[in-house]
Structure formats: structure tokens, C-alpha cells
Image (spheres, grey):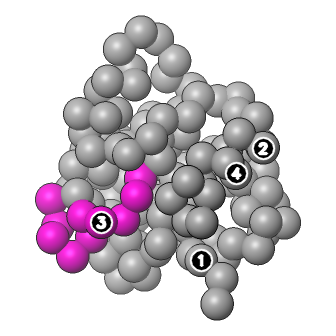
Amino acid sequence: MSKRILVVEDNEDNRRIVRDLLASAGYETIEAVTGEEGVRFAETQRPDLILMDIQLPGLDGYEATRRIKANPALRQIPIIAVTSYALSGDDVKAFDAGCDAYVTKPFNPRQLLAKIREYLP
């Protein structure tokens, strides 16, 4: 059975790139466009891993991550921040919110898959 990855990303082009990359690696994807939708899908779909954009409309990726990690039933799901926020300290903010890993955009597809495989061997 393939692993399911929730992609929380508001940009359609970025979602398509990640969707194609994950499909080629044999992963099933679930897509959310907002932080609120990401939290709801985490609760209802129970993905094996979450790729979380930080800059989202409404509820940002930091708060969406906090809400997911605050739920005991979801706390164990690894969350990888995939973001264009690459300034000094942005990674610390992502880790403080509960993200397990941090990848900057534009990302190298091989590096993103390697990071995913650290959590989904």
C-alpha cells in the first residue's frame, strides 16, 4: 500500500510540481489549498506525512502545524515545511511551530524525496 502525503500549498503550479514528483516516486497525494483545509484533511484523511507551505491565505503554515501537533491523534505525523521563507531564523520558527524538517523553495526534487524518505522509508 502506498504512503499518503498531504500537500498543503496554495500555489497551483507548486502543487502540480509536487504532485508529479510524489506520483513518480509511488506516493499518493492529498491536496489542501489553505491552512484550515490542511488541518481538516489531517484530521479526516490521516496522511503518513505532511508537506506544509508556510505562507498560506488565512491560517498560515505555522499555526496549521501547531494545531495538527496539538491533536494527540495527529502528533506523530511528520510535517516538513516547504517554503520560500529562507531568511535566518525562519527555520527556527518552523521547528518551534512543530515542523520536523525544513526545505526551502525552489527545492531540488532529489533532496525533497530524500527528506521524505527519512520519515517514510
Q: Which residue is mark 3?
A: 76
Residue 107 is at least partly visible in this image: yes
Task: Give residue 10's position: percent from left, percent from top.
Answer: 56, 48
The residue type indicated by label 3 comes to Gln
Tell me if residue 34 can be seen. Answer: no
Residue bearing mark 4: 113
At label 1, the amino acid type is Lys
N-term-proximal mark, 2 vs 3: 3
Q: Please tell me whether mark 1 sits on a helix, a strand or a loop.
A: loop
Which quadrant would the N terminus be assigned to in this image?
bottom right
62, 99: nearer the viewer: 99
Point out the stretch of residues depicted in magenta: 70-79
Q: Are marks 4 and 2 in contact (CB under 8 Å)?
A: yes
Distance from the alpha carbon under mark 1 to that under mark 3: 15 Å
Disc on res. 3: 1
Q: Furthest-bottom residue in view? A: 1
Mark 2 and mark 3: Cα distance apart in space: 24 Å
How crowded pointer 2 is (Cα within 10 Å; few <14, some 14-19, many 20+) is rated as few
Q: Identify which amino acid the numbered label 4 is placed on.
A: Leu
